[in-house]
Image (tube, rainbow, N blue to C red):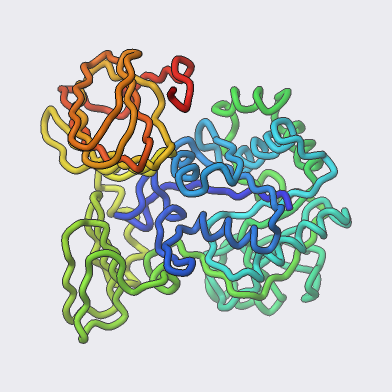
Amino acid sequence: MNIILLSGGSGKRLWPLSNDVRSKQFIKLFKDGENYESMVQRVYRQITTIDADAKITIATSKSQASAIKNQLGEKASICVEPCRRDTFPAIALAATYLHDELGVGVDEAVVVCPVDPYVDNTYYESVKTLQELAEQGDANLTLMGIEPTYPSEKYGYIIPESGDSVSKVKEFKEKPDTETAKKYLAQSALWNAGIFAFKLGYLLDKAHSMINFEDYRDLFNKYNTLTKISFDYAVVEKEPSIQVLRYSGDWKDVGTWNMMAEVMSDKAKGKAILDETCENTNVVNELNIPILCMGCKDLIIAASGDGILISDKERSGYMKPYVEKIETDAMYAEKSWGTYTVIDVQPGSMTVKVSMKAGEHMTYHMHNYREEVWIVVSGKGKAVVDGMEQILRTGDVITIAAGCKHMVEAITALDIVEVQLGDEISVSDKIKFPEEIKFPLE
């Protein structure tokens, strides 16, 4: 299978664990055996269980690329959007990436689906069927519609011509009120969950008809000039040759804490104690201090360096406008080389814990406006400071003056406490020089 997974969105609805650099699909609340895994790891595992040879490309924003590399390594291809431009430009860019960079042929079928539903493996068996239907070429577009379990107001609807497992599409309907949704269900309607398949050449022709570009590199360079428009509006609702595959298995959109609590592996994760009087309460604690819950009923409690949420489960679905009033920088981020956790912020200083995976390295870079002091807490590594290489061991301290080029490579798992000093401490104060250092270091 050729699969494009759409991994976008900001981190408002699962605050404080999610933020602008760690969206819900990267939070590790599920389990594979004894190990916790995120949505993106779970989805990758499920797809490759159904098709070990599946070629998976993740279309994502620049802010999420490091987290994907951290969690999947080099297992999946990543097509990075220079900026957010909605689903049609994202899919067009990913399609040209598949053709021009990965060599996927125009007659090969491609399936596009979101990265964040909670499903069992039958869903990806249906995704494989979707690709096979697209390969047959009976329609230009083949959708997968979710058989509704209730008359929802949250989803758009696909109205098929029949209730057969595969049917031509009669029309599409916007998100309705409950009474209208009941009428749709009487017509064998399906939820439109943004899952569709096509031959790659079809989508490339569509993209060229709507956007003036030569190839993938050209489209990437002019991406910020593209009109923001969804794939549904740009393509699906205007396509006369379209069919839908009915999916009747379990499917959950875990976009809120209330829904996430239904599927997360444990009632409590992290340092948390719930007494015997607690009912229907979930706790996720990323802080290194305990949370004690007594007499809690129907609550979600989530704590991270970004903040603490205590909410009635049903009410948690309405948190977004309140979270938008909270203005803080992300205190935790997953990088391609490991994790970055802010410990303390003061005027003129910020203290960070850097945890690097063995064999990984940072880019060679410098900061114009801040000095850094590194204290090696555990592990062994190599540092390069203005071209001078040195071994790092537990207890070593290095001072990096503003304007000095520097980087670290982890020989073993490596923990460093980094103290940033300066009047202007900003993530934007970073200039990279990747071409000046070759890895691994000699």
Q: Position of residue 417 (x, y in %)?
A: 21, 37
Which image quadrant for residue 127? Answer: bottom right
Q: Residue at x 17, y 65 (%)?
A: 290
Near-viewer residue (442 or 330): 442
Relative placement, left or right, of 303 versus 157 is: left
Which image quadrant for residue 390? Answer: top left
Q: Residue furthest bottom?
A: 277
Q: Residue at x 18, y 67 (%)?
A: 291
Near-viewer residue (95 or 343): 343
Q: Residue at x 35, y 72 (%)?
A: 314
Relative placement, left or right, of 158 versus 389 is: right
Camera sees residue 329: no
Q: Position of residue 176 (x, y in %)?
A: 56, 66
Q: Is residue 178 above or below residue 19?
A: below
Quarter holding the C terminus? top left
Relative placement, left or right, of 391 versus 140 is: left
Q: Position of residue 66 (x, y in %)?
A: 45, 39
Q: Residue furthest left?
A: 347
Q: Residue at x 67, y 38 (%)?
A: 92
Q: Is residue 207 above or below residue 44?
A: above
